[in-house]
Image: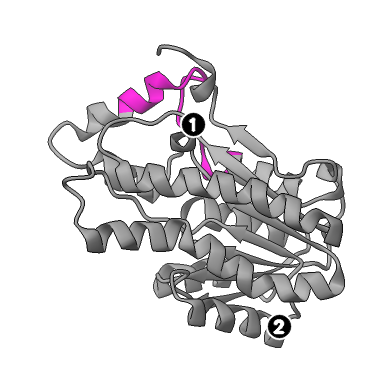
Amino acid sequence: MGRLHGQVAIVTGGASGIGAATARLLAAKGVRVVIADIDDGKGQAVAAGIGGTARFVHCDVASPGDTERLIGFTASVFREPDVLVNDAAILSSKTVHETDPAEWRRVIDVNLGGVYNCCRSVLPGMLTRRSGCIINLASPHAYATGRAIAAYAAAKGGVLALTRQMALDYIRHGIRVNCVVPGAIDTPMLAADTQQGAEWQENLRGWERNQPIGRLGTPEDVARVIVWLCTDAAAFLVGSPVIADGGLLAQLLP
C-alpha cells in the first residue's frame, strides 16, 4: 500500500461508524486526522482514543460557514489537508409525499450539499499545491433503490454524479476524486433505520440475508477501501465508484 505517513486528512461524519473507523485507520498509517461531526461527545471520544495526531471540531457540513472554519481549524493545528473524506450523512426513510419540504432540504443539504460545501472549502488549497485526494461516500441507492427512501436515494445519486464530474475538473490539477459505495454496514445509522417498529430484529436479519457475502459489513471493511484509495496504489483510479457491498449490487434477486 502506498505511503500516507505525514499527510493530513479531514474525515466528516467521523464520530461513529465508517467515519470513525476511517479516522482510526488513517491515524494508524501515520496521518494526522481532523474529525468533523455534529456529535461533540462521540467525536471528542474518537479523537481522544487516537491521541495527539487527531483533533475534533464541531461541524455541520450543511453550513458553508462551518466547512470554511473546518479548513481553517485544520490548517491552524496541522496544515491544510491532503485528504478529504466526505462521510457525513443522515437518513430519511419516507416516500416523497411523506417527506415535508424541510426534511427534504435537510437530507439533500447534508448528504449532497455537505459534499459540495466541504469540497468547495478544501479545493483552493489543493489547487494551489496541485495535489489532493477526495473520497466521497455514495450508496447502492445511487444504482438500485428500494421503497420509501426518496430523499436519501436522490442525494446519494447526486453524490455519485458529482464525484464523476469533479474528477474530470480536477485531475489535471493533481487532485483525484473517487467514491466508495458501501452496502449494508453495521453502523448506528443502519441500526436506527432497522429498529423502527416491532420487527426490527427481522429487518436486520433481512439485510444480512440479502447480502451474498452472508453478513453485514463492518465499518473497518469500508475504511480499508477508503484508505487504500488515498494511497498511490490507487493512483490510476479517477472518478471511480468503488463498490464495497458484499455482492449486494451484483445479484438480480436475493
Q: Quadrant of the C terminus?
A: top left
Q: Which of 44 and 110 is in front in this view?
A: 110
Tell me the element at label 1: loop
Q: In which quarter of the view is residue 125 placed?
A: bottom right
Report the side of 49 relative to 133 (left or right): left
- The mark nearer the N terminus, 1 or 2, is 2
Badge 1: few (under 14), some or many (20 or more) residues near its Cα, within 10 Å?
few
Image x and y of residue 144, in percent: 44, 28
Residue farthest toward the bottom in the current orientation of the protein:
76
Badge 2: few (under 14), some or many (20 or more) residues near its Cα, within 10 Å?
few
Using the image, determine if residue 116 lies above or below residue 187.
below
Is residue 98 in view? Answer: yes
Q: In which quarter of the view is residue 30 placed?
A: bottom right
At label 1, the amino acid type is Tyr
Residue at the image position 76 percent from the left and 67 percent from the top: 82
Q: Give the range drawn in magenta.
A: 205-221
**Mark carried by residue 75:** 2
Report the side of 20 relative to 190 (left or right): right
**Mark carried by residue 171:** none
Image x and y of residue 50, in percent: 62, 66
Image x and y of residue 122, in percent: 67, 72
Residue at the image position 60 percent from the left and 33 percent from the top: 243
Nearer the camera: disc 1 or disc 2: 1
Q: Quadrant of the N terminus?
A: top right
Residue topped by disc 1: 143
